[in-house]
Image (cartoon, grey):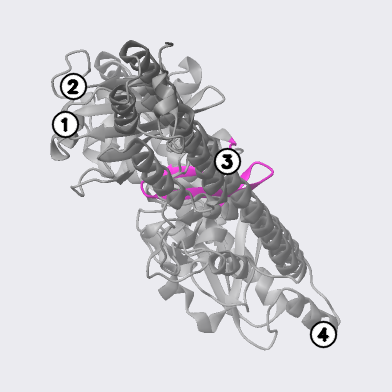
């Protein structure tokens, strides 16, 4: 009798091993099937072997199915990430998908920001303190992953001695009760952008499969982040280019239409919320120092001054001023030539996916990049406008200078032609005028007059190296001129005819020369004076008075002058300085820059030449020397009997 096959007695409708595997039966179902076969009389050893094989096959099939699910999930995530346009939403999608795929308690992303790592977003976090935390680049597990560019995990973060424990990182871990922690790099083309982390609030060992899964997700996320950054940069570049083209077109139209610098500054302000003001060079304070530095270096690039950015406006090596952007202009008015500001505004916040690694490089304070570009494009056009405006002003001034000099230099017998000359100089021939002549720097005098606010019915010129001003007598220049820092000037008039104008010019010029010869200087209380204000000095310094003065010098100081000419020793200078210094030898030596013994030797010589009683006439000699020097300066270098070097 042959042995009966137990499989033959089994219910032919019951499932076999293959059917159970095809139905994705689990281990309990496979074990139940093994018991059923043994109960039906199947060989137990053979059945156990078949069951073990079936369990192995079932595990492999389950693993394959899981891989297929994960691969499908990764593909789905990649598609979702590629479709997310907002960088902030993209990071949220990354941490949510990572938490779902790995089945962990917490996931978060830390991006590199300069030399630090900043936690940007999290999923499953318990405290609000996690997002926004900045960590040193070498701190904790996240720093280790960022530095090495390879995945790393720990089963218990706080107890892991191999990690660099830093207080801010440990504090964040304690706040979230993090124990098991896995981190993988967010890298693209060999460049680490940040770290993607998955955490459990219990001790957890992460297997190779989980590391591979999170690494795959991080790879998709890094590409998406890099693409988002690139797209944002391209959008910004496109918008910046369009804005630049619009600005160039707008400002160019304004320049071609004859727009003045004030209108150009207003147009710049209209294109940005950042306050913009104009500061003219030279200026005081930190902005003035920045402009002075730009003028010295010849580099018209932007300069950061505190919270403001100074964009110099320059052309052909000449600095005209600067566009200043920043909070200092809040609430102030616009205007060329005064430190005015503009409309208040705030810079847009930086996005979370801005290239944080370059934040601060080339940074210009609190002023955003679009405003900086605006200033950079506007500066050359404003400089061009200023160059044109100043050239036009110089041409107009030159024409008026020529007309003014013509009035002062010659007469015109034709009354109608003479009136046209007055009007060509900007003057009304029907009104009385005064003439002012300034000794010294003509440009300084011109700047002083420009600040007096005299209006348009005045004429000025540089005639015979002196600044000349012709103004209506009704302006009352004596009250406007000032005395402390004003240039020393002579005044004559009023006159109403061209001949009188020329005579007034001569009188004012002589008065100005006399004032300068008598030691008047800006800041010494000199100011504006008429010839009558000189009193007795006007007589003494007249042509007749000067001759008598020279004769008196010869009588009083003839022996001293002769000895000085013979020996070449400055005796008259020593005498004058000695009297000016209150007859103190030490002070005289210091003023002359000679040894005090030299002064004593010269004084002894003077005693021998003038007699022992000359010190009793000290005041008389001092006045004589002062008048002689003043007369010499009035008469020029050819004056006779000079009392010493000028």
Q: Going 73% across and 68% down the picture, which residue do you hit? A: 400
Left or right of 402? Residue 131 is left
**How far across and down, in percent of the image, does residue 440 sit?**
54, 50
SS for callout 1: loop
Between label 4 and label 1, give the one nearer the viewer. 1
Closer to the chain start, of discs 4 and 3, is 3
In the rendered view of the protein, which quadrant contains the N terminus? top left
Give me the disc on residue 165: 2
Between label 4 and label 3, give the one nearer the viewer. 3
**How far across and down, in percent of the image, does residue 425 sit?**
72, 73
Per the rendered image, the range of residues in magenta is 298-321
Between label 3 and label 1, give the one nearer the viewer. 1
Label 4, on which residue? Answer: 415
Label 3, on which residue? Answer: 227
Label 1 Cα neighbours within 10 Å, binned few <14 / some 14-19 / many ≥20: some
Label 2 Cα neighbours within 10 Å, binned few <14 / some 14-19 / many ≥20: some
């Amino acid at each position: 009798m042959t042995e009966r096959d137990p499989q033959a007695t089994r219910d032919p409708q019951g499932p076999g091993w293959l059917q159970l595997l095809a139905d994705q039966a689990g281990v309990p179902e496979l074990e139940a099937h093994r018991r059923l076969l043994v109960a039906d009389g199947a060989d137990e050893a053979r059945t156990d072997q078949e069951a073990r094989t079936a369990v192995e096959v079932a595990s492999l099939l389950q693993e394959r199915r899981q891989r297929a699910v994960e691969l499908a999930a990764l593909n789905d995530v990649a598609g979702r990430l590629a479709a997310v346009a907002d960088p902030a939403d993209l990071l949220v999608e990354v941490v949510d998908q990572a938490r779902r795929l790995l089945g962990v308690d917490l996931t978060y992303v830390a991006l590199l920001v300069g030399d630090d790592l900043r936690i940007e977003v999290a999923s499953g976090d318990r405290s609000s303190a996690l997002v926004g935390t900045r960590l040193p680049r070498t701190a904790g597990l996240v720093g280790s992953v960022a530095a090495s560019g390879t995945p790393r995990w720990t089963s218990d973060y706080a107890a892991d001695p191999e990690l660099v424990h830093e207080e801010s990182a440990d504090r964040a871990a304690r706040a979230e009760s993090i124990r098991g922690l896995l981190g993988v790099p967010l890298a693209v083309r060999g460049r680490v952008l940040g770290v993607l982390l998955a955490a459990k609030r219990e001790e957890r060992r992460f297997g190779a499969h989980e590391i591979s899964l999170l690494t795959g997700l991080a790879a998709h996320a890094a590409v998406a982040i890099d693409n988002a950054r690139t797209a944002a940069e391209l959008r910004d570049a496109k918008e910046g280019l369009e804005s630049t083209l619009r600005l160039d077109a707008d400002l160019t139209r304004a320049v071609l239409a004859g727009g003045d610098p004030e209108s150009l500054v207003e147009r710049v302000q209209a294109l940005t919320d950042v306050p913009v003001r104009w500061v003219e060079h030279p200026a005081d304070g930190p902005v003035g120092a920045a402009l002075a530095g730009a003028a010295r270096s010849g580099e018209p690039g932007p300069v950061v001054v505190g919270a403001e950015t100074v964009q110099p406006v320059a052309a052909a090596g000449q600095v005209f001023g600067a566009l200043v952007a920043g909070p200092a202009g809040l609430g102030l008015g616009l205007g060329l030539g005064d430190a005015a500001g503009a409309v208040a505004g705030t810079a847009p916040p930086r996005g979370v996916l801005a290239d944080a690694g370059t934040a601060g490089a080339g940074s210009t304070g609190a002023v955003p990049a679009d405003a900086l570009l605006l200033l950079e494009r506007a500066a050359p056009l404003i400089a061009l406008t200023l160059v044109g405006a100043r050239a036009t002003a110089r041409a107009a001034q030159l024409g008026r200078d020529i007309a003014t000099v013509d009035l002062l230099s010659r007469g015109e017998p034709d009354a109608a032609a003479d009136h046209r000359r007055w009007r060509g100089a900007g003057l009304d021939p029907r009104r009385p005028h005064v003439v002012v002549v300034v000794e010294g720097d003509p440009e300084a005098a011109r700047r002083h007059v420009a600040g007096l606010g005299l209006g348009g019915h005045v004429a000025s010129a540089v005639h015979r190296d002196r600044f000349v001003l012709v103004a209506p007598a009704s302006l009352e220049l004596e009250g406007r001129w000032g005395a402390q820092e004003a240039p020393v000037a002579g005044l004559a008039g009023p006159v109403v005819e061209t001949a009188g104008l020329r005579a007034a010019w001569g009188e004012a010029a002589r008065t100005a020369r006399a004032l300068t010869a008598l030691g008047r200087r800006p800041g010494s209380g000199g100011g504006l004076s008429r010839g009558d204000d000189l009193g007795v000095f006007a007589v003494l310094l007249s042509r007749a008075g000067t001759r008598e003065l020279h004769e008196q010098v010869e009588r009083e100081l003839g022996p001293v002058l002769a000895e000085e000419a013979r020996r070449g020793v400055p005796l008259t200078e020593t005498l004058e300085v000695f009297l000016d210094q209150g007859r103190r030898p030490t002070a005289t030596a210091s003023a002359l820059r000679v040894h005090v013994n030299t002064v004593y030797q010269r004084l002894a010589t003077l005693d021998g030449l003038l007699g022992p009683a000359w010190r009793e006439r000290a005041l008389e000699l001092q006045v004589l020397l002062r008048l002689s020097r003043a007369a010499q300066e009035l008469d020029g270098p050819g004056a006779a009997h000079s009392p010493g070097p000028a």
